[in-house]
Every structure is written in C-alpha cells, then in structure tokens.
Amino acid sequence: MAGDDAFPGTGPTLERAARRAAVPGPVTHGLTIDLEDWSDTQAVRLYGPHPSPPPRIQESTPLVLELLARHGVRGTFFILGRIAASRPALVRRIAAAGHRIGSHGFSHRPIGELGPAGLRRELTASRAALEDAAGMTVEAHRCPSWSLRPGTLWALPIIADCGFRVDASLSPGGTPFIGTPGVPRAPHRVRLADGRALREFPLGVGAVWPRMPFSGGFFLRTLPPAWTEACLLGFEHRGVPAVLYAHPWEFDPGTPRVRLPQPWGFMQHHGLERMTERFGALLARHRFAPLEELCAGIDWDRTAVWRAETDSRRPRSREGTAVRTG
Ligand SMILES: [Zn+2]
C-alpha cells in the first residue's frame, strides 16, 4: 500500500496491534472534546480581528453537553487552563455530568511557540487550575492545534514530567498541517529516552497515504459522512479504537463568522451548520467512552512501542526526531 511505502512500519503496526487483540469485544472508541473558544484557533489568533468579538464558551459548552447527554455518551474534555482558572464552575459542570477532565494546555499557544520552559509553565499551571476546579486528578493531555510533531517532539518528556500519563496529541501521517510519519494508528506506548512511557491515543487517520484525519473537527465537517463511517468501521474490523474529537464552538450557531484569509477561513467555518447532525449520527451508531476508561480495557504491554529521539536543547531543530516502531 502506498502509505506503508511512504512511512515504513506504520501500516503493519496497526495490523499487528489488531492481531494482538488489545481491546476485547465490540470496539469502544475514544470521545474527546477540546474545550476552547472559537477565537482560540490558530486561524483567528493569527489572522482574526483584534479585539475579537466576545467569547462564546459559556454558551457553546452546554450545547455539546446536551448533545452527549441525549446520546448517553461520556468523554474526555481537554480543557484550557485559562478557561478553568476563569470559569471553574464550567469545569465542575462538565465533571458533574460524568465526563473526565484532561489538559489542553493553558493559553492554546502551539508547542513550538512556547518552547520548553514555556510549555512546562503552561502544563503545570493548566493541571493545577483544572484539578482545583474539578476536584479530580488530571492525567490526560492533548496539545493545542496538533502542534506535537517533527520539530517539537522534545515536548514528550516535559508532558510526562508534568504528571500526565495519557496523551492524545500525536497524529500519524502527513497532511501539510499536521502529522508525524511513523506514528502507529492504534493506541500505543510512546517510550521516552529515560525509559518512561506515555499511553498514546493518536488522532484517527485513514489507512492510505497521506493518512488524512477523518475523526473530528474540520475533517468531520468537510469529508463525506460515508468516508468517516468507512474509516471507523475499518478500525472496528481490526478491533482497534479510534478517537473522535470536536470543539464546543463547532456546535454553536452563534459562533461569529469573521473575515479570515484562505485556507484559514475555509477551515474555520466550512460545514459548521452540519456538525451537530454529523457528530450526533456517529454517537448514535458507535460506542464511545472517555480515554481514561478505555485505558483500563487495553493490555498496554502488548501494544506497539514508538520511540522519538528527543532533544530539548535544540527545540526548533528537525534533527533528533528519528523514529522507529517496534
Ligand atoms: Zn485546541
């Protein structure tokens, strides 16, 4: 297959993980919500109007909570530390509905922009704000804007240092915007140089090059529903969970349509009017759970191991990112 030629080891890794039957019985996928405001996206942050129109997080979050409640589904909410610090009652409402709380960083600035010291500060502050607000231990992390990729893999030991055991930041494959070639498509262990390991739930991507993401956000709004369904069924056929993701502002009819250069405007706004219907249809047809609960059903000792050579002394270098699967 073309994808396997382009990224040796990636395809066989999924097949191997599936054969190892890491997840017994019918497949339950991971459900994740990245709790950020519409103006936190890279598109609006870089090219949007300043000052931006007012925040909508207080209005948009209940919409996604109600949708999940209608389908009896719980998930992991990756929440910005800034929102947890300023709106702790919102975090408590999410936790009270039975969802798990993870960190989406503090400010939504991408990893490469923060650098090692900034990332450490943000993750520490984010975890503290979330645990204070939710009254529960926070162990799961997803970086902003899929910014954990070649050039920023030095972040992995910092994520572990800050107390996170579960990560959902890596994307297999290689679109121009996101993706790290060689990352397995199934849940796997990311082995750090000092022997520690993170439990990784990668972004759901297609089986063939360029391994286009299918399982959330812009991709879910834009690609044909039949394609999304086929990809999810492909994961289920192999006994492997995929990870679905969305943002509250994608369900909110009140999300401002601001002027943005292309392709940013397209990625921000396209298909917003159909997100609730498409996401709801997936919730109705498939099984989902928070990542922390999926962890308990996975025999991690039998999942693939992925190693990233990291070098925090040269954070912006593309060197030191050689990878291998095993
Ligand atoms: Zn985000």
Image (tube, rainbow, N blue to C red):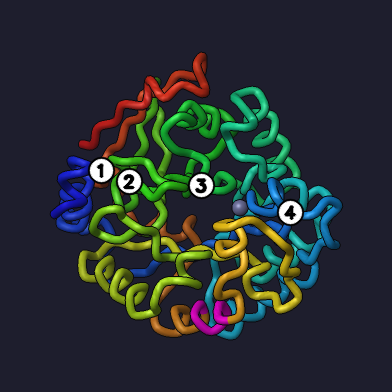
Name the residue: 55% across, 81% down.
Answer: 274
Measured in 3D between alpha carbons, the distance from the residue under mark 3 to the one under mark 2, in whole angstroms, is 17 Å
Against 214, residue 11 (above or below) is above
Measured in 3D between alpha carbons, the distance from the residue under mark 4 to the one under mark 3, in whole angstroms, is 20 Å
Against 191, residue 97 (above or below) is below
- Dot 4 falls on a residue whose secondary structure is loop
The residue wearing badge 1 is 304
- Dot 3 falls on a residue whose secondary structure is helix
Task: Give the mark nearest the N terminus, 3 or 2.
Answer: 3
In this view of the protein, can residue 50 be seen by the observer?
yes
Number of residue marks: 4
319 relative position to 238: left or right: right
Task: Give the mark nearest the N terminus, 4 or 3.
Answer: 4
Measured in 3D between alpha carbons, the distance from the residue under mark 3 to the one under mark 1, in whole angstroms, is 21 Å
Task: Give the mark nearest the N terminus, 1 or 2.
Answer: 2
Task: Give the mark nearest the N terminus, 3 or 1.
Answer: 3
Callout 2, which amino acid? His
The residue wearing badge 3 is 146
Name the residue: 78% across, 72% down.
Answer: 59
The residue wearing badge 2 is 188
Name the residue: 62% across, 48% down.
Answer: 104
Instruction: Check if residue 325 falls in the magenta segment.
Output: no
**Label 1 CA crowd tier, 10 Å (few <14, some 14–19, many 20+):** many
Q: What segment is highlighted magenta in the picture?
A: 274-279
Callout 3, which amino acid? Trp
- What secondary structure prevails in the magenta region? helix
